[in-house]
Image (cartoon, grey):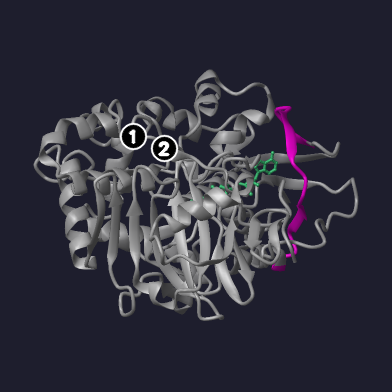
C-alpha cells in the first residue's frame, strides 16, 4: 500500500509524493455502527498510541484507536522501495533502551536487527569539510576527535556529567542539574572555546546539532547532558545507542506487531485518516470530534498527540496554563533526513561532516541496495534549514557537497517533518528552561484525558523507547481505574 506521506525522487520519475509502506492500514476503519461504545479512545497510532492500545486491548478493555494519517508508526515508519527499507523517521534502537528491548523480546525480533556501520571496504574513512578546508581521517581518528571534544563539553563536574545527572531516568535528581537547563549549548561552548581546536569545534557543534536539529542557542545544555547520561557518559555509548542498530525489515515491521496483537484480541476498533479537532471532557465521559464531523465517546481518552501540534486541538475544559504555554513554545527539532542512493559502491564505509556551510551536515554509508548501490543517510537541521521537496536541486547539491565527486545520485527518499501537520518537527529536543518549567505539567492528566508521548517521557525522552514508556504508563493508569485489581485471593 502507498501512504500519502513521504517523497521519492529519481532522474527518471522526478519528484513524487507518497511512498509504499507496510504500515498503511486498509480499509481505513473497522467501525461499522455509530452506536458502538468504547471504554477508551486512544488518539494517535505512533509507538505511544500503539503500546497503550495493545496493552488496553490485552487487558480486556474495548478500545477505539483514532489516527489522522493513513498509517501506523507516527514519527517512526519505513518505506520499502524496490526491496530496500528506507527509514523515514525513527530508526535506531539498542538493548540499553529498556522499553524498546522488552518489546523486541516480546515479538522475538532480536535477530531482526542489523548494523548501520560497515567499516570494512572501499572508501573507508571520515571526511570533515569545514570553512578551513577538507580533512580526511581514519574512523579511529574520527572517534578520537569527537570523543575528546565531547568530553571537554560535558565535563562540568570533573566527572563528565555523572555528578550532575547521576540517574538518567530521573532528570532533575540533583538540585544543580536545573542550572544547566538555564544554559544553552552555545553558552557552554563559549565556556570551553579556548580549549577546542578548529576541527574539534566543527565536529562538536555538528554533533550537538545532529542531536537537537535546532540551533546552538536554542538547544538546552541540560537535555544534551541527559542524552549523554542515557548513553553511559561516553561518545562510544552515544554512537552505539543513537545510530548503530536498525531493523532489517524497517521500523514498520516492528510497529505492525503491536497493531496486529491488539487486533487479535477482538477488542480493537480503529479509524485512520481521521484528524481529531476537539476533545470534550464531560466528567462522566469524553467526546472526541474529528475534522470529518464524526464524534466518538468513551470513559477515558489517551491523547498521544505530539507536543508541537497539541495546540491545534480544542480542549474543553481548556488545558492548564503551563501545558498550554509549553505547547505554544514546542520543541526545537526541525531535522531534515534525506536518503540518497548513489552509484559509488565503495562509499559504504564512508562517514562525513560538512559544517556549517552545507544544508546537510552529517551523513554515513548506511547500506547497500539490491542494485549494488550505496545508501547514504544524511541529516540537516534548523541551523541551515532546507525544505527538500521544494528544491530538489538544492537538496542534491547538499548531498553532493558532503563528498564532492563521490555522490552520483540515483534516488532520493525523505519525509518533510517540519511541514508535517501532525508532527511539525522531528524528535523532541528542548530549548533552555523548557524542561525545568514544563515537564511535570506535560505529564499531568487532565480529568479523564491521559497524555502520553515520547516528547515528555522521563527516560529515553525523544526516542521510540520513550514512546513505549509513555504508552505503558497511560495504559496502566487507565487499566487501574477501569479494571481495578482486587486484593489477591489466597486459598491454602
Ligand atoms: P508520534 O510518533 O508522533 O505519534 C503521534 C501520532 O498522533 C501520530 O501518528 C500522528 O499522526 C497522530 N496525530 C497527531 N495529530 C493528530 C490529530 N489531530 N488527530 C489524530 N491523530 C493525530 N527515535 C529513536 O528511538 N531512534 C531513532 O533513530 C530516531 N530517529 C528519528 C528520526 C526522525 C527523522 C524522527 C522524526 C524521529 C526520530 N526518532 C528516533 C524519534 C521517534 O521517532 C519518536 O520519538 C517516536 O516515534 C514518537 O512516538 P510517539 O508515539 O510518542 O509520537
Which of labels 1 and 2 is toward the front? Answer: 2
Relative to 109, is 412 on the left or the right? right
Q: Is residue 123 left or right of residue 366?
A: left
Around disc 2, counting alpha carbons within 10 Å, would you say few (fewer than 14), some (14 to 19), or many (20 or more)?
Answer: many
The magenta span reads 264-289
Q: Quadrant of residue 145?
A: bottom left
Q: Is residue 468 above or below residue 225?
A: below
Q: Position of residue 24 (x, y in %)?
A: 71, 61
Q: Which residue is identified by label 2?
A: 383
- SS at circle 1: loop
The residue located at (61%, 56%) in the rendering is: 73
Residue visible at 59% across and 47% down in the picture: 416
Q: Is residue 284 magenta?
A: yes
Q: Residue at x 54, y 25 (%)?
A: 328
The picture places residue 134, in percent across and down from the top left corner, at: 27, 55
Q: Earlier in the sequence, mark 1 or mark 2?
A: 1
Quarter assignment of residue 402: bottom left
Q: Nearer the viewer, residue 78 or 314?
A: 78
Q: Could you say which is closer to the camera, residue 86 or residue 134?
A: 134
Q: Quadrant of residue 418?
A: top right
Q: Where in the figure is residue 334, as x and y percent of width and height?
A: 49, 41
Residue 216 disc label? 1
**Callout 1 touching callout 2 (CB < 8 Å):** yes
Q: How many marks?
A: 2
Can residue 161 be seen from the camera position used here?
A: no
Q: CA distance from mark 1 to mark 2?
A: 8 Å
Q: Is residue 445 visible?
A: yes
Could you say which is closer to the camera, residue 456 or residue 392? 392
Mark 2 lies within 8 Å of ligand 1 (Cβ measured):
no
Tell me the crowding category of disc 1: few under 14, some 14 to 19, or many 20 or more residues within 10 angstroms, Cα based. many
Which residue is drawn at the image coordinates 55% and 68% (left, top)?
A: 250
Q: Is 289 located above or below residue 38 in the figure?
A: above
Amino acid at each position: 500500500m502507498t501512504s500519502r506521506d513521504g517523497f521519492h525522487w529519481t532522474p527518471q520519475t522526478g519528484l513524487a509524493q507518497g511512498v509504499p509502506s507496510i504500515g498503511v492500514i486498509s480499509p481505513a476503519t473497522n467501525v461499522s455502527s455509530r452506536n458502538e461504545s468504547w471504554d477508551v479512545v486512544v488518539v494517535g497510532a505512533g509507538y505511544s498510541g500503539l503500546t497503550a492500545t495493545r496493552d488496553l486491548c490485552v487487558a480486556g478493555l474495548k478500545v477505539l484507536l483514532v489516527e489522522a494519517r493513513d498509517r501506523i508508526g507516527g514519527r517512526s515508519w519505513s518505506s520499502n522501495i524496490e526491496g530496500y527499507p528506507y527509514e523515514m523517521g525513527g530508526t535506531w534502537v539498542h538493548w540499553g533502551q529498556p522499553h524498546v528491548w522488552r518489546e523486541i523480546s516480546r515479538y522475538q525480533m532480536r535477530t531482526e536487527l542489523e548494523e548501520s556501520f560497515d567499516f570494512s571496504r572501499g572508501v573507508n574513512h571520515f571526511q570533515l569539510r569545514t570553512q578551513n578546508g577538507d580533512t580526511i581521517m581514519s574512523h579511529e581518528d574520527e572517534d578520537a576527535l569527537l570523543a575528546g571534544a565531547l568530553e571537554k563539553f560535558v565535563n562540568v563536574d570533573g566527572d563528565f556529567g555523572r555528578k550532575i545527572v547521576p540517574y538518567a531516568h530521573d532528570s532533575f535528581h540533583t538540585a544543580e542539574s536545573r542550572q544547566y537547563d538555564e544554559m544553552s549549548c552555545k553558552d557552554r561552548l563559549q565556556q570551553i572555546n579556548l580549549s577546542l581546536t578548529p576541527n574539534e569545534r566543527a565536529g562538536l557543534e555538528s554533533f550537538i546539532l545532529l542531536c537537537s536539529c535546532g540551533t546552538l542557542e536554542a538547544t538546552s545544555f541540560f537535555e544534551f547532558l541527559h542524552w549523554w547520561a542515557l548513553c553511559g557518559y561516553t561518545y562510544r555509548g552515544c554512537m552505539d545507542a543513537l545510530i548503530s542498530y536498525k531493523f532489517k525489515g524497517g521500523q514498520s515491521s516492528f510497529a505492525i506487531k503491536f497493531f496486529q496483537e491488539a487486533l487479535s484480541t477482538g477488542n480493537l476498533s480503529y479509524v485512520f485518516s481521521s484528524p481529531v479537532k476537539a476533545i470534550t471532557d464531560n466528567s462522566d465521559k469524553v467526546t472526541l470530534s474529528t475534522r470529518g464531523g464524526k464524534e466518538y465517546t468513551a470513559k477515558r481518552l489517551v491523547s498521544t498527540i505530539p507536543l508541537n501540534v497539541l495546540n491545534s486541538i480544542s480542549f474543553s475544559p481548556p488545558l492548564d496554563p503551563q501545558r498550554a504555554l509549553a505547547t505554544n513554545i514546542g520543541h526545537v527539532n526541525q531535522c531534515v533526513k534525506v536518503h540518497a542512493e548513489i552509484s559509488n559502491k565503495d562509499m559504504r564505509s564512508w562517514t562525513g561532516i560538512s559544517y556549517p556551510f552545507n544544508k546537510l551536515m552529517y551523513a554515513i554509508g548506511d547500506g547497500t541496495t539490491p542494485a549494488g548501490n550505496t545508501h547514504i543517510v544524511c541529516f540537516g537541521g534548523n541551523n541551515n534549514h532546507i525544505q527538500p521537496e521544494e528544491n530538489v536541486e538544492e537538496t542534491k547539491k547538499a548531498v553532493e557537497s558532503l563528498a564532492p565527486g563521490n555522490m552520483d545520485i540515483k534516488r532520493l527518499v525523505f519525509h518533510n517533518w517540519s511541514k508535517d501537520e501532525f508532527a511539525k518537527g522531528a524528535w523532541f529536543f528542548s530549548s533552555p528552561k523548557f524542561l525545568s518549567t514544563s515537564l511535570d505539567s506535560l505529564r499531568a492528566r487532565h480529568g479523564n484525558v491521559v497524555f502520553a508521548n515520547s516528547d515528555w517521557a522521563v527516560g529515553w525522552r525523544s526516542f521510540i523507547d520513550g514512546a513505549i514508556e509513555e504508552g505503558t504508563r497511560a495504559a496502566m493508569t487507565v487499566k487501574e481505574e477501569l479494571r481495578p485489581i482486587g486484593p489477591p485471593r489466597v486459598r491454602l
